[in-house]
Image (cartoon, helix red, strand yellow):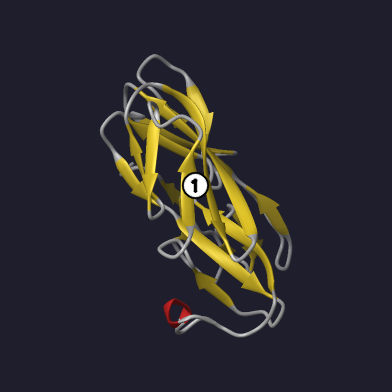
């Protein structure tokens, strides 16, 4: 590789996974995307800073080095390309911030070893809501009882009760 590729794992590039996706921002906000390169060796590396980024509609959202900045209300896509692969991320810019986050279902029962998905919705002042399950940050109040992954899937570890919480955009 070139001098600019120092520290990247060896192997063949399988694909690029952008995180988070989709991106929902209020006007004036900026969010740094990750662009995770997956290699056939099982290794992964964030190449957001090395990738070439473009926005389909720079009047709505610009992207520099993976940092998406919201300019005007609307919807567009940003694309990051690196190593011959590319990934597109939908971007929605809103005039307002979500006022609360709702997790559905509110109560989830899973058996030990069983798993079930949760969904997260950002709710706006006027009652509109948008699913943000994959963009939210998930955590379990007690990992010894229930584990929750980045996609909101809860897995039962032991008998008992735990709370899986999602956070998104400061909520």
Residue 68: give x, y in percent of width and height. 38, 44
Q: Residues within 10 Å of mark 1 (few under 14, many from 20)?
A: many
Q: Is residue 34 visible?
A: yes
**Residue 51 left/right relative to 113:** left
In the depicted structure, whether residue 11 falls above or below residue 91: below
The correct choice, above or below, for 79 with respect to 9 in the image is above
Does residue 28 sit above or below 155 in this rendering? above
Task: Give the image quarter of residue 133.
Answer: top right
Give the residue drawn at x 43%, y 82%. Answer: 3
> Residue 26: x percent and y percent?
33, 30
Residue visible at 48% across and 60% down in the picture: 51
**Residue 121 can be seen in this image:** no
Residue 1 left/right relative to 114: left
Q: Position of residue 54 (x, y in %)?
A: 48, 44
Q: Nearer the viewer, residue 21 or 37?
A: 37
Residue 40, picture quadrant = bottom right
Asked if 122 appears above or below 114 in the picture, the reply is above
* Quadrant of the drawing holding the C terminus: top left
* Foreground pick, 112 / 86: 86
Single out the residue that lies furthest toward the top: 126
Give the percent coordinates (x, y) of residue 22: 53, 41
Extreme residue in the front direction: 2
Q: Element type at marker 1?
A: loop
Q: Which residue is mark 1?
A: 135
Q: Decide if residue 66 is on the left or right side of residue 109.
A: left
Residue at 39%, 33% in the rendered image = 61
Q: Nearer the viewer, residue 104 or 22?
A: 22
How many marks on residues?
A: 1
Point out the image quarter for the N terminus: bottom right
Q: Residue at (56%, 83%) from the top-left corner? A: 9
């Amino acid at each position: 590789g070139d001098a600019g590729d120092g520290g990247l794992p060896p192997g063949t590039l399988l694909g690029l996974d952008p995180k988070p996706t989709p991106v929902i921002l209020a006007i004036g906000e900026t969010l740094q995307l990750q662009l995770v390169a997956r290699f056939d060796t099982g290794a992964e590396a964030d190449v957001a800073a090395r990738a070439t980024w473009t926005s389909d509609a720079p009047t709505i959202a610009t992207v520099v080095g993976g940092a998406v900045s919201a300019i005007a209300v609307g919807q567009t896509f940003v694309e990051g390309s690196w190593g011959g692969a590319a990934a597109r991320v939908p971007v929605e810019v809103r005039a307002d911030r979500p006022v609360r986050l709702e997790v559905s279902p509110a109560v989830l029962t899973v058996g030990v070893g069983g798993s079930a998905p949760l969904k997260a919705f950002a709710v706006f002042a006027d009652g509109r809501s948008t699913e943000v399950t994959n963009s939210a940050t998930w955590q379990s109040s007690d990992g010894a009882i229930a584990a929750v992954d980045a996609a909101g899937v809860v897995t039962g570890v032991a008998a008992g009760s735990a709370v899986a919480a999602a956070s998104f955009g400061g909520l």
